[in-house]
Image: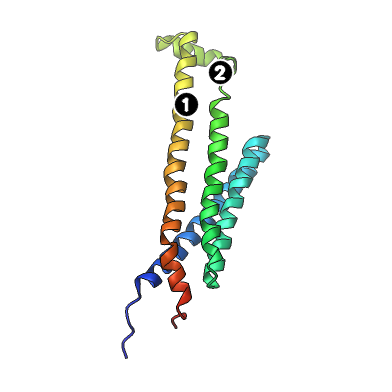
Amino acid sequence: MTVPPPTPQQLALKRVLKISRMNGWSVALFAGLCALISLALGDLVGGGTGLFIAAGGVMEIRGHHLLKKREADGLTWLVRSQLFVLGVILAYAVSRLFSFDSEYVLSNLTPEMEGLLKDGGISRAEIVPLVQTAFRAAYGSVILVTLIYQGGLAFYYRRKSPLVIEALAQPPSI
């Protein structure tokens, strides 16, 4: 007796389950670890942000488990988890963009650093725009990557919803 090939609906469900398991656990563990490190270093904002992002990973794991139990509500959890993580990261990155402090940059220059800057032909006044550009580029990149990844994954889960719902309506294959 031959086994019929999986339907597109079954393939979509299998793929969504695989992605949600891997992404949910990755986000929860990595963000949780980063939160602990931030809190240990005394960074309450970074620690809180990490905890919120870890909660988004747990939401995705919850959605995965609901889908495994053949409950369509799991799809809602998957999409919302991505939008939640997206919102938290965007709020954090935008708040950091507006927190640049040129006085803080200058106060952290050590005599050795100033010597290296002089050797490179860079004055103390020229360093602030360079650091500010790097600062904006870093957080701008975080925003762009987050929009592409989390937004794309939310879109993917939403786009696969009809196929997954059809697969859940079918009797489970043995």
Q: Nearer the viewer, mark 1 or mark 2?
A: 1
Which quadrant holds residue 19? bottom left
88 versus 54 height, above or below: above
Q: Position of residue 65 (x, y in %)?
A: 56, 67
Picture layout, residue 65 above or below residue 77: below
State the residue at coordinates (57%, 42%). Answer: 88
Q: How is the image coloured?
A: rainbow
Label annotation for residue 105: 2
The residue located at (34%, 84%) in the rendering is 3
Q: Quadrant of the C terminus?
A: bottom left
* Other residues around mark 1 within 10 Å, as few (<14) / some (14–19) / many (≥20): some
Q: Secondary structure at mark 2?
A: helix
Q: Position of residue 89 (x, y in %)?
A: 54, 40
Q: Which mark is residue 7?
A: none
Q: Label 1 amino acid?
A: Arg
Q: Which label number is shown at residue 136? A: 1
- Point 43% across, 52% down: residue: 155
Label 1 to label 2, Cα distance in Å?
14 Å
Q: Residue at x 56, y 18 (%)?
A: 105
- Of 73 and 140, nearer the camera is 73
Q: 122 or 17: nearer the eye? A: 17
| x and y percentages locating residue 147 in the rendered image | 45, 42
Q: Earlier in the sequence, mark 1 or mark 2?
A: 2
* Secondary element type, mark 1: helix
Residue 85 % position (x, y): 55, 47
The N terminus sits in image quarter: bottom left
| In the image, residue 80 above or below residue 128 | below
Are there few (<14), some (14-19), or many (20+) residues within 10 Å of tag 2?
few
In this view, the residue farthest toward the bottom is 1
Tell me: 37 left or right of 144. Answer: right
Q: Amino acid at mark 2?
A: Val
Closer to the camera, 158 or 64? 158
